[in-house]
């Protein structure tokens, strides 16, 4: 019953509006246009608010991205410093080890050189230190490789060994170690 009362009242209101629009067409069109404009303006406000929120979110995302880039750049610089420090430690240790071994080889060379100078000579002009003891039945090869050449060869062998060791230790460094 109440519903029928409401529908009757709405019908009368609609009839009155139509009569008013028929009686004053320009004014009705103007009022209708104003109502539609207000409705659209309200919708535009919501769209503008949504757009502004999206712009704000986008700006925040860009700021967060720039911050993350700066942090990553600092972390990368720190990582590179750590890796370079490890590499330098390996290089320094390898050089020190090589220098110690080379100094020992030079000291041995000097001892052998002095012992050759002071060594008694056997008939035929050879020093006792040049006489090699070999197994019976094997003829010793002539000694074309002098003491100074042996020092150079030993130095080069030590250098090559140090270089191989250095490369292996450098390759073992994890460049992505955090």
Image (spheres, rainbow, N blue to C red):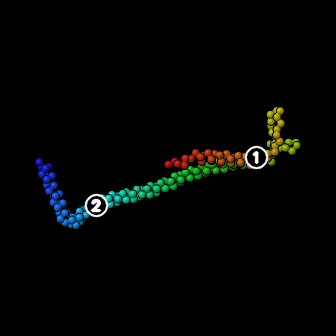
Residue density around tag 2, few if under 14, some if 14–19, many if 20 or more, within 10 Å: few
Find the distance from the CA under tag 1 to the CA under tag 2: 99 Å
The secondary element bearing badge 1 is classed as: helix
Q: Residue sitting at 55 percent across and 51 percent down?
A: 83
Q: Residue sitting at 82 percent across and 32 percent down?
A: 136
Disc 1: which residue: 150
Mark sitting on residue 90:
none
Q: Position of residue 100 (x, y in %)?
A: 66, 48
Mark sitting on residue 40:
2
Tell me where residue 24 sits by quadrant: bottom left
How many marks are shown on the rendered structure? 2
Tell me where residue 129 sits by quadrant: top right
Extreme residue toward the right, this view = 124
Location of residue 140 with respect to 99 vertically, above or below = above
Q: Position of residue 81 (x, y in %)?
A: 53, 54
Please tell me which residue lies in front, 68 or 148: 68
- Mark yes or no: residue 26 visible: yes
| 96 left or right, relative to 154 | left
Please tell me which residue lies in front, 142 or 111: 142
The secondary element bearing badge 2 is classed as: helix
| 8 left or right, relative to 88 | left
Q: Residue sitting at 82 percent across and 40 percent down?
A: 141
Residue density around tag 1, few if under 14, some if 14–19, many if 20 or more, within 10 Å: few
């Amino acid at each position: 019953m109440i519903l029928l009362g409401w529908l009757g009242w709405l019908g009368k209101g609609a009839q009155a509006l139509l009569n008013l629009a028929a009686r004053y067409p320009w004014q009705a069109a103007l009022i209708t246009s104003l109502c539609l404009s207000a409705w659209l303006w309200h919708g535009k406000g919501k769209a503008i608010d949504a757009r502004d929120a999206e712009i704000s979110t986008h700006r925040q995302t860009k700021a967060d991205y720039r911050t993350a880039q700066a942090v990553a750049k600092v972390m990368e610089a720190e990582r590179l410093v750590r890796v370079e420090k490890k590499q330098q430690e390996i290089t320094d240790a390898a050089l020190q080890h090589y220098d110690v071994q080379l100094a020992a080889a030079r000291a041995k060379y000097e001892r052998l050189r002095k012992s050759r100078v002071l060594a008694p000579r056997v008939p035929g002009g050879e020093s006792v230190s040049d006489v090699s003891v070999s197994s019976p039945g094997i003829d010793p090869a002539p000694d074309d490789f002098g003491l100074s050449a042996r020092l150079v060869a030993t130095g080069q062998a030590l250098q090559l060994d140090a270089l191989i060791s250095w490369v292996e230790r450098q390759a073992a460094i994890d460049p992505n170690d955090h």
